[in-house]
Image (cartoon, rainbow, N blue to C red):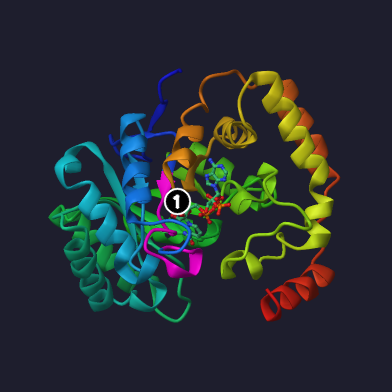
Amino acid sequence: MRAMDYTKLGKTNIKISKIGIGTWQWGSKSWGYGESYFKEDLEKAFRAAVDGGINFFDTAEVYGGGESEKLLGEFSRDLRENIIIASKVLPNHLTYKGVMKAIKNSLARLKTDYIDLYYVHWPNPIIPMSWTARAFNELYESGLIRAIGVSNFGLKRLIKFDELTDGKVSADQVKYSLLKRDAEKRLLKYCLSNDITLVAYSPLDQGAVLGKYNEKELPKDIWRRISIIFTPINMRKITPLIETLHEIAQEKGVKPINIVLRYLIEKGAVPIVGVKKEEHVKDLLKTFDFNLGKNEINKIDLILRDIKLSKVRATLEAIRRIIKP
Ligand SMILES: NC(=O)c1ccc[n+]([C@@H]2O[C@H](COP(=O)([O-])OP(=O)(O)OC[C@H]3O[C@@H](n4cnc5c(N)ncnc54)[C@H](OP(=O)(O)O)[C@@H]3O)[C@@H](O)[C@H]2O)c1
């Protein structure tokens, strides 16, 4: 197995693995925590990630109602210097005082005295960005955070927040996956040429493109029941993509997840994958074991060009799945 690859986080000298671990699912009952996976599974997943060279972990004050930060803090206690913790402040906490209170609580849950990368989780058009930026600048100056990030910020907002923090924004975390490629229009290019890491969330389309689900077998958790992708009509529409990813994976002797992640990494993003168990992590670790050439990338792009996801009918199907799981 080839070792993990690393890159620099934005304008900092912080070294991060080119694949990060997302922890939205950690401690979150709405994802099935305590039913289909447990604390022991997450601890094993964490250890497997660290042993495999992954050092970049993503959490947020909101995940699992704070449980995700607590678990990550507990698992990483003896390794604090070796791992990079990213956390996020909620949009309703973006006043100066709100940010200060939120970080205090996050630090307490994580049982650490600094956060490596602190993000604004979502923009809030009602609270002036300058208030939030003032808090972020102070946190940076005092060493409580080592890098500044934003999440779900489009290009205009990203540029504004970067100006308000004297060019210190080092990451924009947005949804970027095979089925959601809006970031490719302008944001990715801007980030690549301005030393801002584009962190891709939901990079696996929450598992939709991996071939484990189909129009008849759909996941039961609420997050994927409200998604228009996990609907019979759209699962049918993405079948050619699932088949192509399988074909390429077979040729390369890996799994479709590795093809998806390499595709996003080759485009310049750092994907963070939501994991619930050790096996999920073990799969990720094969992502750098093969070469993904232009031909394969073009093949995937060609298939994607022909996929037009349904919105109206899929929304109706999703509503049906919410009422009758
Ligand atoms: N900033 C934001 O607003 C925002 C929003 C969403 C997410 N995020 C972050 O991004 C992270 C990743 O996004 P995400 O969790 O939404 O989606 P994702 O990473 O695309 O998908 C995660 C799901 O894929 C499945 N999976 C993971 N590894 C697998 C493997 N090796 N083989 C097969 N299936 C596998 C798991 O579900 P099953 O096994 O149950 O199928 C898992 O719950 C989150 O954990 C969170 O940290 C941030």
Residue at left offset 80%, top offset 61%: 232
Report helix, strand or loop for mark 1: loop
Q: Mark 1 is on which residue type?
A: Lys
Q: Is residue 64 above or below residue 267?
A: below
Q: Is residue 322 magenta?
A: no
Other-residue count near label 1 (Cα within 10 Å), few / some / many at <14 / 14–19 / ≥20: many
Q: Position of residue 296 (x, y in %)?
A: 73, 25
Dividing the picture into quadrants, the one containing residue 140 is bottom left
Q: Position of residue 220 (x, y in %)?
A: 62, 65
Name the residue nearer the viewer: 238 or 183: 238
Residue with the most extreme front position: 35
Tell me which secondary structure the magenta stretch mostly adopts.
Answer: loop
Q: Is residue 297 above or below residue 225?
A: above
Q: Is residue 288 above or below residue 16?
A: above
Q: Position of residue 28 (x, y in %)?
A: 42, 66
Residue 169 visible in image: no
- Report whether the residue tagged 1 is closer than 8 Å to ligand 1: yes
Q: Is residue 27 magenta?
A: yes
Q: Position of residue 150 (x, y in %)?
A: 42, 58
Please provide the residue range marked out in magenta.
Answer: 21-33
Q: Which residue is mark 1?
A: 276
